[in-house]
Image (spheres, coloured by chain):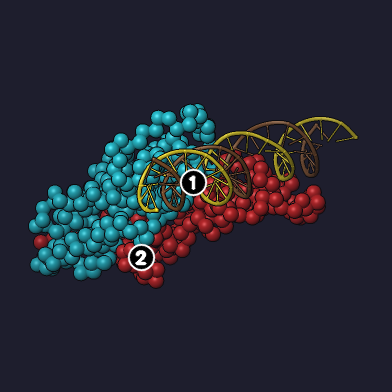
Chain colours: A red, B cyan, C yellow, D brown
Amino acid sequence: MRRPAKTSDKSPPAGRRSAKPRPARAPAAKPYHHGDLRRVLIDAAMQLVGEGGPDAVSVREAARRAGVSPGAPFRHFPSRDALMNAVAEEAQRRFGAEIEAALADAPSGDPLGRFRCLGIAYLRWAMKNPTHFEIISSRRFFDHDRSAGVSSDNAELIGLTERTLAEAFSAGQLGTSDLKQVQIAGRALVYGFARMHIDGHLPRWGVTEAEAEQMAADIVDLFIAGIAGRVAPAAKA
Amino acid sequence: MRRPAKTSDKSPPAGRRSAKPRPARAPAAKPYHHGDLRRVLIDAAMQLVGEGGPDAVSVREAARRAGVSPGAPFRHFPSRDALMNAVAEEAQRRFGAEIEAALADAPSGDPLGRFRCLGIAYLRWAMKNPTHFEIISSRRFFDHDRSAGVSSDNAELIGLTERTLAEAFSAGQLGTSDLKQVQIAGRALVYGFARMHIDGHLPRWGVTEAEAEQMAADIVDLFIAGIAGRVAPAAKA
DNA sequence: AATTCGTGTAATCGGTGCTTACATTCACAA
DNA sequence: TTGTGAATGTAAGCACCGATTACACGAATT
């Protein structure tokens, strides 16, 4: 197994089912026995992810924190992976919300500036929520193409960057016409930096934790500059 | 645990220790009982990594493939992580060898071309050996700064790119003077693309498996072009 | 009030990392 | 040649894990 020493599997018998806080004014959703075990399990798992990364999540520990027997979670999730999937969806939701919020503050007249803003927001969230970002990224826990509600969110984010980039091109802000290459390269840049941060590579490359955020902005700017002025329509010799 | 159903733990009793192929002409290293169990375990683990990724490696399965009892590996590796570490060192060794081999073929008069060559070789190896690359990348399995023999290899590779980039700058091939930013950005680019490939993101971004290698070269070229001609000494308006 | 079905419990299975006690076998020295 | 010690492997067992099954409870429907 992966988690070497944890608390005992046994909790005090708790006198059967005496003080289980049922949801008072029933929200007409799933207030059967526990209240909303599914939700509580996801929250517990999210917390575990935040504490020790994806590998620190075990169904049993989530059940333990929810005050429920080890088998109970399997009524709501057919497997551990399904639980992780739900956690990833939650993380993806928060991520998408923050990206769109950041973009809402960006000026609408400067597509390339908005593109830059997307990269900055992406990196800021990834560096502030490394473990959650890791879950979203690795397809081990999250089959982006399968989960209904959030895959559209994700696809929309991809479409958002595509549209923004296309606008920048139309506005003559781009020095190259191969938008797909720019799209992929930009994504690889921010994804790579985020993962370097998560995977602890930055110190080896001479970037301290304190410098990381500034460096993130710098490389985005460097990339933007690289794709912007290179063969600008009027500045060519 | 992670691996749901495997072969039975029991192998046929095998009549004690009858036909264990000791290494014939003893290589004066560690030919005690098994021959070179440490080596065999690493090979088995490497194979497991290649088959199902890092999570598919279990000490027991490695022992099984080595034809040895489940506890035997712990005579050579104090923990599973230590085994993974050895595997990662092996992978890092192969990786470094390929990179240096590729660089040996590059023209020595064109530093920026050599820098590009480094990126291409990096991506080619990563895409051809995704699981091994993953092990090298994630510090979960490989503490780069701790392992003696190979960390120098790794540090040397970092130094290699730094030197190459510095040469390119000295030769006037660079349009920016902040080499550290270029260094980090370049690393993030290739690392990010490699991980996108590994993590299965490329299809979602409209890049098929067949196009991946070409795209890898394209984005490296795009990056090189971006850092090269931007504020070239004589071409400024 | 009786039944049904969703939910949680208890017990259990096989897998895992890891430890301990014991057995074997090589290497070196008296 | 013969001990003897250290290196190496085996056997057994612990705690933990994911997952399944049979059973118990309880709210909702009839």
Residue B181: x and y in percent read: 27, 66
Q: Amino acid at mark 1?
A: Phe
For the point 66% across and 43% down, the residue is A71
Residue A180 seen by the camera: no
Residue A140: x and y in percent read: 46, 45
Helix, strand or loop at mark 1: loop
For the point 20% across and 69% down, the residue is B177
Q: Are marks 1 and 2 in contact (CB under 8 Å)?
A: no
Q: Quadrant of the C terminus of chain A?
A: bottom left
Q: Chain of mark 2?
A: A
Which residue is denoted by mark 1 in the rendering? A141
Q: Which of the 4 quarters of the picture holds residue B46?
A: top left
**Of B129 and A180, which appears nearest the observer?**
B129
Please report whichever mark, 1 or 2, sits nearer to the chain's N-terminal start: 1
For the point 35% across and 55% down, the residue is A192
Q: Residue furthest bottom?
A: A210
Q: Amino acid at mark 2?
A: Pro
Helix, strand or loop at mark 2: helix
Q: Is residue B99 left or right of residue C17?
A: left
Residue B237: x and y in percent read: 13, 68
For the point 18% across and 65% down, the residue is B166
Asked if residue A49 is positioned above or below residue C14 in the image, the reply reads below
Residues packed near mark 2 inside 10 Å, few (<14), some (14 to 19) or many (20 plus): few
**Of B42 and B122, which appears nearest the observer?**
B42
Q: Are marks 1 and 2 on the same chain?
A: yes
Q: Which of the 4 quarters of the picture holds residue B24?
A: top left
Q: Chain of mark 1?
A: A
